Amino acid sequence: RQDTTLTGPIETTLCDYETVESVNEELFTNLSELVKTPFFKYFRADLYRDCPFWEEHGFCMNRECGITTVDESEIPEKWRAAALSKVELPSEEQRETLPGCYYRDSDYCYLDDMTEGDYIDLSANPERFTGYIGPSAHRIWSSIYQENCFGLDDAQDELSAPSGMAYIMTGRYRALSFLKPASDEGQQCLEKRVYYKIISGLHASISTHICAEYFNQTTGEWGPNLPCFINRVANHPERLQYIYFNNVLLLRAVSRIAPYLSAYDYCSSGTHEEDQRTLDVVTKVVGLATEAGKFDESVLFRGENANVLKEEFKQHFRNVSRIMDCVGCDKCRLWGKVQTTGVATALKILFELDEKTLDPRSNSNLLQRSEVVALMQTLHRFTESLHFVGLFREMWAAADRED
Ligand code: FAD
């Protein structure tokens, strides 16, 4: 039996495994309540944009790949497209646009244009086993990992990126990639490692959800699949470590915007008591996030070429968010979009926003609702993954006792 217990410091953070575990169950319970509230459960996404990189034929026909959308009339009026487009969309000068999506300078992802797409009640479309497998899924993952190439040393890798990738590589970005001086290599390695940890940890978290809520085609029943978890995650201890790493990163982002989240207007269609309850739960989550979210963002993007490297990192992450349009299973695409937006929002909070910007009084429209929702939903995914990891550990120990 392999021991999956993790102890001691979590690499490139200021936190240890024990601290993350000590707050996780309480965090998970509170976040589970939060993501069911009207403010946090509705997400608008454009799930039917063409894949910009290749002709995608891998459509998943399983029933589980489908999603149910909700009619706009069910959405609290304040969050509907018409209202959103008035207050939330940045002006043409502030954003770079592609059909159906855009990004601002500080963004680490493309955001769907909130006047297009469907409303989805995330609580009614849980992330779990869908049966989306094979070349289409593998191509997505390998394209995402291929984005992990930075600077001169990686120029060769970059040339093998998916052929359509040039579509979103601006001239500026291409120039940056090839001009990267070799002298920052140490620094470059750290950022590259962090990028890999984020992606691999996200992949491991998705795999954990698939294995925890697995459909057994022989019995026709849903339930945890221990061999699936062992093969995909536990047999690769670093993947498990990266789930913790992502947790710390997201917790740090949430704690960094604590005043902003406390001042946010969570008013929706509910009663005053319901809105107050949402705020109370947010406050609890923020408190726990502050205890465990010890990540030192200041060690990244330092040195002479820090800004160049940061631009590159950002562009790679934006590419990842567009790769989501190539995922051939609607439910996987939905959760892929939610989670890449959530991680991208955390990165923006950590690397783009200074203390002054974070002041909710001077900058109340700092984040869009979709970013706040994605951040909390993604943190919920990761705390749930750790919760499932605990259950799998127990199952594994019980299986060992039986042997
Ligand atoms: P995959 O998970 O496809 O992995 C491909 C290869 O990557 C592996 O062979 C391995 O070499 C490597 N690898 C695997 N994990 C890691 C890791 N953590 N770090 C580094 N390398 C790794 N399926 C569902 O059933 N439900 C979903 O909700 C769902 N959502 C998805 C969302 C996205 C964005 C994508 C791209 C896919 C999603 N899928 C989902 C499909 C799922 O992730 C797998 O691709 C599928 O189950 C096939 O799994 P696999 O065992 O062949 O390996």
Image: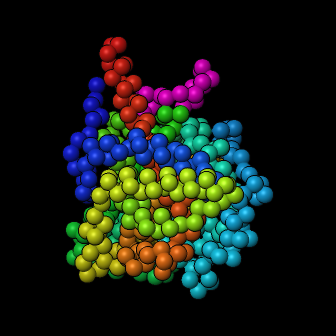
Magenta region includes residue 390: no
Residue at 28 percent across and 25 percent down: it is: 1
Residue placed most toward the observer, 126 or 275: 275
Residue 354 placement (x, y as % from top left): 38, 76
* Relative depth, front residue between 17 and 165: 17
Who's the residue at 35% across and 30% down the image?
393
354 on left or right of 274: left
365 and 191: which one is in front?
Answer: 365
To which quarter of the image does residue 183 belong? Answer: bottom left
Is residue 29 placed above or below 96 in the rendered structure? above
Q: Is residue 83 among the parts visible in the rendering?
A: yes
Query: Could one spot residue 161 in this view of the protein?
Result: no
Q: Position of residue 64 (x, y in %)?
A: 65, 38
The colouring scheme, among rainbow, by chain, secondary structure or one colour, is rainbow
Q: Position of residue 83 (x, y in %)?
A: 71, 71
Residue 86: percent from left, percent from top: 69, 77
Task: State whether residue 91 is above or below residue 332.
Answer: below
Q: In which quarter of the image is residue 124?
A: top right
Relative to residue 171, is residue 186 depicted above or below? Answer: above
Q: Give the range drawn in magenta.
A: 214-230
Q: Residue at x 33, y 23 (%)?
A: 397
**Residue most extreme to the bottom:** 93
Does the stretch in magenta take in 226?
A: yes
